[in-house]
Image: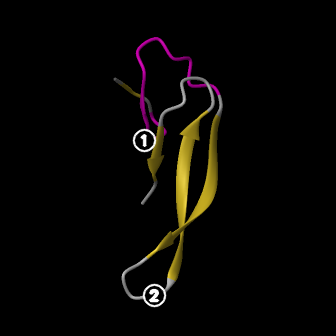
Amino acid sequence: MAEKNDGLRHREGCPAKRVETYEVERHSPHHSVDQVPVKRCVDCGVQEVSR
């Protein structure tokens, strides 16, 4: 895993040129819905929840 400066652990050899951020809804145990930002690399498909 190559660590790029966008905080994602990209696959080896990934150019990491296009990283998109989108929001997903996560249901917490307290019956509320949280909007969680997720970063995803378009080139290699790695995605992580950004904090």
Most prominent secondary structure in the magenta stretch? loop
Residue 31 vertical position relative to residue 27 in the rendered view, above or below: below
Quick one: quadrant of the N terminus? top left
Name the residue rendered at 41%, 15% in the picture. 12
Quick one: quadrant of the C terminus? bottom left
Identify the element where label 1 is drawn.
loop
Horizontal and vertical percent position of residue 18: 65, 31
Answer few, some or many: residues within 10 Å of disc 2's Cα (few below 14, many 20 plus, some between 14 and 19).
few
What residue did someone put label 2 on?
31
Name the residue rendered at 63%, 25% in the picture. 17
Mark 2 vs mark 1, CA separation in Å: 30 Å
| Residue range highlighted in magenta | 5-17
Does 7 lie within the magenta span?
yes
Q: Of residues 4 and 38, which is closer to you in this image?
A: 38
Residue 32 vertical position relative to residue 26 in the rendered view, above or below: below
Q: Amino acid at mark 1?
A: Gly
Horizontal and vertical percent position of residue 15: 56, 17
